[in-house]
Amino acid sequence: MHTRLSAADLDYVVTWVREDIVSEIDRILAQPDISELELSRSLALGGLLPMFGFPTRVRTLYSDKFPTAKNLDNHIVSDRPLGMAITNYAPGAEVVRDRLVHVAAGFVNYDRLGGKMVPSDPLGKGHHVSRCPQCATTFIDGPTMEACPNCPSPMEAFKLYEPLGFRTTYKPRPYRIDQSRSQSKSLPTFVSTGADPSPIPVAGVDVRLYEQGKLLQYNDNRGKLFNLIKTEEDESVVASDSSLYRGGWKGMPTTGRDLGKSAIGEIRTTDAMTVDFVRLPTPGGFMPTAAHIVPAGQAALYSLAEVLRTAAKQQLDIDPQEMQAGLQHRMAGSVATARVFLADTLDNGAGYAAQIAKSDVFGQLLDDTRMRLQSEYEDASHRGCSTSCPDCLRSWDNQRLHGVLDWRLALDMLDLSSGHELRPTRWFDRGDEIKAIATGLHEEIRVKFVGPDSVPLLIVDFEKVGVLIGHPLWFRDRVEKGSPQQIAQKSAIEAIPGYRVCASDFVEFGRRALPVLDAAVTGLTPALSEVTNA
């Protein structure tokens, strides 16, 4: 024996194999998301066997029905991992190959039996997904819930399939200059199973490690779901909504078994770690994502998630695509917030999340990343980047987030998570940019800098209105006594007595300058005195 295991360890392994392995196999096979036909593959997906040597979840797009073993390659357009196929091959998506446009229309699957290709159920087991539209709390294959346990909003329930194969309309057309179309999918959602593990405190945050949690991504046809019909000819399933197909679909099957409305997606069992913001130097110690409290809150958390994912790459010497990052939405009392999660991309995990979740490792990652990125992002060579760029936060695999990523917000969240106060100069030294935007909207808008931090105050004299452009992470519903926020707000009110002063911030005003001014002038935005006295 050369395993370096002690006698007690060996006895434990032997006892486990003799007495516990059968019940463990039964437990895995009873999971609704384990739908593989082969036992070994099912046990690998359930974490009992290693995934090494098993094929990944690759899905094929078929261009014609009833392929044979000999002409199979001629019936295949292409293949993609399931996580990509639910968008690239979703009904209505168009795939170009050999100067032909193939329009994805549904799902089909074939099993090889001897020398024959036999059609089989292309959808597999269905999953029951419950999701809160307000706070995005999500449950997979749990009991039916009418109300969200984190907020009072009603839950939305839908059926989800992990397709085993995809089909086209079987009628390709010549490619012209018209662009191909693809569907969109949800951002990654981490769903923990079982009770929350004990938190590991690190500076201003709590870290938790979830082993064998569920990572969910789905395509729900932009909330409308796919109306599915199972055809009678080749066991395939098609989406029967003609609006999905550019120019319609002549010859679309209209008879068959109605399967109702469903989404398609991927549920992956893997390891993940979460970062809870519980001791930040902010009012209440957390970071709201509610737009009426901190409009930039959600963008700040997404920016931090991408920074941590990239930092994990350097800490562990891995490719960034080996980990996925996202938000797990929650409620802090009656206020929407979220925690960041980092999950291993590989089925059953690769040990990366478990390593990062160690107290000393994550603490060092926070400190090193904060110092390194401050030097890189605030360097003169990078100051021309107003929000994000390929040199800081943007990459191919996070392109859906490009509109919200902001390197300054990422640095702010690193400061807060490490237990440090916000640095006002990171934003307030951009006062000239705010002045240029304001005067571009109306030449009579004045800009005055108030308080010790020189916070920009836009003044619309002909409406007797002022707009204070504060820090993006200042709370709108509460102000701490003696804080830089309170000092700036008091200075703004005193600078233009008799005027109605409203609050905005650099991120909100930079992206929505005209609506911000309009809301202040028309009274839709509450005055600072009203907020302070609330």
Image: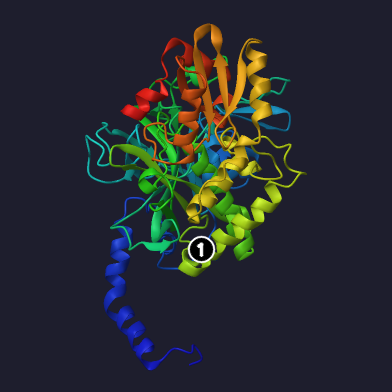
**Which of 479 and 291 lies nearest the eye of the viewer?**
479
The mark total stands at 1
Residue 370, percent across and down? 59, 55
Give the residue drawn at x 73%, y 28%.
99
- Pick the front one: 500 or 402: 500
Relative placement, left or right, of 295 versus 98 is: left
At x 46% / y 23%, what residue is drawn?
493
Quadrant position of the C terminus in the picture: top left
Percent across and percent down for residue 238 are 45, 29
Dot 1: what SS? helix
Residue 427: horizontal and vertical position, in percent? 61, 37
Type of amino acid under label 1: Phe
Residue at horizontal 43 percent and vertical 31 percent from the top: 220
Residue 275: x and y, percent? 44, 54
Q: Residue furthest top?
A: 462
Q: Work out whether residue 149 or residue 74 is closer to the camera in this orientation and state it.
A: 149
Residue 415, visible in the rendered structure: yes
Compared to 396, does 519 lie above or below?
A: above
**Is 120 left, or right, of 143 in this rendering?**
right
Location of residue 12 by image quarter = bottom left
Q: Residues within 10 Å of mark 1 (few under 14, many from 20)?
A: some
Q: Quadrant of residue 331?
A: top left
Q: Say if residue 115 shows up in the picture.
A: no
Instruction: Tell me: 38 left or right of 117.
Output: left
Is 258 placed above or below 418 here?
above
Asked if residue 129 lies left or right of residue 65, the reply is left
Give the camera-side residue of 349 and 151.
Answer: 151
Going by the picture, which residue comes out furthest to the right? 381
Vertical placement of residue 184 versus 8, above or below: above
The chosen color scheme is: rainbow
Q: Which residue is mark 1?
A: 362
